[in-house]
């Protein structure tokens, strides 16, 4: 799609992973506000955010590894 440009440096990768994790956390807090008793950061929200962070790092590692092959 963008030829690995976002995964060129690990600084960009970590910044992107933090952004995605924060986005997932905000969505989970908003869902908790609608469904639960108020807007709170819950263990489920932190778990989903951590999974999003690690998933982004894993995909970036796979893309960088594939781009490094001759």
Image (cartoon, rainbow, N blue to C red):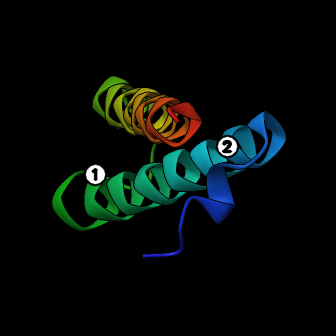
- The x, y position of residue 53, in whole percent, is 49, 34
Disc 2 crowd rating (10 Å Cα; few below 14, some 14-19, many 20+) is some
Kindly state the secondary structure of the residue where label 1 is placed.
loop
Q: Is residue 51 above or below residue 19?
A: above
Q: Quadrant of residue 51?
A: top left
In the picture, residue 52 is in which quadrant? Answer: top left
Image coordinates of residue 17 in percent, x first then y, are 58, 43
The count of marks equals 2
Residue situated in front as seen by the camera: 10 or 43: 10
* C-alpha span from label 1 to label 2: 35 Å
Residue highlighted by disc 1: 37
**Left or right, 13 with reference to 63:** right
Q: Disc 1 vs disc 2: which is toward the camera? A: 2
Rendered view: 61 above or below 38: above
State which tag comes first along the sequence, 1 or 2: 2
Image height of 15 relative to 51, above or below? below
SS under mark 2: helix
Dot label at residue 13? 2
Residue 32 point in image, percent of width and height:
29, 54
Q: Is residue 15 left or right of residue 51?
A: right
């Amino acid at each position: 799609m963008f030829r690995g440009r976002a995964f060129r440096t690990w600084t960009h990768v970590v910044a992107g992973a933090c952004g995605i994790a924060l986005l997932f956390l905000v969505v989970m807090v908003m869902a908790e506000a609608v469904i639960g008793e108020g807007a709170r950061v819950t263990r489920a929200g932190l778990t989903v955010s951590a999974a999003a962070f690690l998933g982004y790092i894993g995909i970036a590692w796979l893309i960088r590894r594939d781009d490094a092959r001759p």
